[in-house]
Each structure stands twice: as C-alpha cells, then as structure tokens.
C-alpha cells in the first residue's frame, strides 16, 4: 500500500500548453540555432522541389526500353533529403545550445571572480 501512496504523492500533471509556449518564448536563440532552423525550413522545400525535378520512371513502353512512359514523384529522394537535413539541423541546434550553456556558465563564473 505504501508504494501506491508514494506514486500518487510523486505524480505530476502533464504540462499545460500555454506554459510550454511561455517557456519557448522566453528562450533566446543564438545564431547557430536560428541557422539550424533556417536550414531545415529551406531543405524541407528543397526536398519537395528535388523530388519533383528528379522524377522516377514508373513504367516502360517495352520490356527492354529506356523510354519512360509515366514518371512519378521521387518520394524516396524527398524523404532522404528531409532526414539528412533534420540530422544536420539537430546537430547545429545542439552546438548552438552547448555554446549558449557555456556562455551562461562563463557569465556566472565571471561574477564570482571579482
């Protein structure tokens, strides 16, 4: 019985949406983080554009023909570009976050030096 009472005492509610929005709005972004968001947005649209430009061949007119009768949207290229850009954006955003944390630590240590 003690275990369930401890769980009910420790249990916390899920965060409310307006509090999460306030947390995000109060967080200042540095250059690397803004650059990462910008790269992801640009690559999102670039994936759609390149998926349309480099279309895949759906069917051929003859069995051994090189001519495409129907071309389709290259979905795999789009998804690949999206995942690569997401990975690069996450890495850049993480570097920006590390720099922000180190800057904050440096400011706090500077106060104690004097």
Image (spheres, helix red, strand yellow):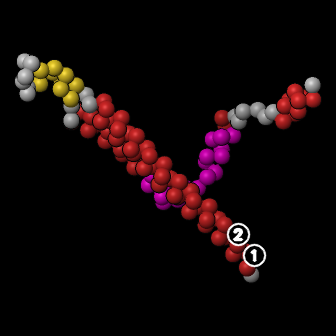
Q: Secondary structure at mark 1?
A: helix
Above or below, 59 against 31 in this view is above
**Magenta stretch: residue 67 in it?**
no
Q: Secondary structure at mark 2?
A: helix
Q: CA distance from mark 1 to mark 2?
A: 7 Å
Picture residue at 25% right of the left edge, 28% below the top? 73
Task: Residue 46: give x, y in percent of width and height.
Answer: 31, 41
- Position of the N terminus by quadrant: top right
Q: Which quadrant of the view contains residue 103?
A: bottom right
Which of the labelled discs sits on residue 2, or is there none?
A: none
Can residue 110 be seen here? The reply is yes
Q: Left of 21 or right of it: where is 40?
A: left
Name the residue tied to disc 1.
Answer: 112
Picture residue at 66% right of the left edge, 66% below the top? 105
Q: Find the magenta span and give its range.
A: 19-37
Judging depth in this view, the residue of 27 and 106 nearest the camera is 106
Judging depth in this view, the residue of 101 and 15 nearest the camera is 101
**Neighbour class for label 1 at 10 Å: few (<14), some, many (≥20)?**
few
Which residue appears farthest toward the top when viewing the image? Answer: 62
CB under 8 Å between discs 1 and 2: yes
Which of the labelled discs sits on residue 108, or is there none?
A: 2
- Position of the C terminus by quadrant: bottom right
Task: Residue 106: give x, y in percent of width and height.
Answer: 65, 70
Q: Left of 71 or right of it: where is 87?
A: right
Task: Residue 104: give x, y in percent of width and height.
Answer: 65, 65
């Amino acid at each position: 019985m003690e275990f369930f009472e401890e769980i009910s005492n420790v249990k916390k509610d899920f965060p409310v949406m307006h509090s999460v929005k306030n947390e995000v709005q109060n967080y200042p972004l540095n250059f690397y983080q803004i650059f990462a968001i910008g790269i992801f947005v640009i690559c999102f649209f670039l994936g759609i554009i390149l998926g349309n430009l480099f279309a895949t061949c759906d069917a051929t007119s003859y069995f051994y023909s090189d001519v495409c009768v129907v071309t389709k949207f290259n979905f795999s290229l789009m998804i690949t570009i999206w995942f690569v850009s997401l990975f690069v954006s996450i890495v850049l955003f993480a570097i920006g976050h590390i720099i922000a944390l180190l800057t904050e630590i440096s400011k706090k240590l500077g106060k104690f030096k004097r």
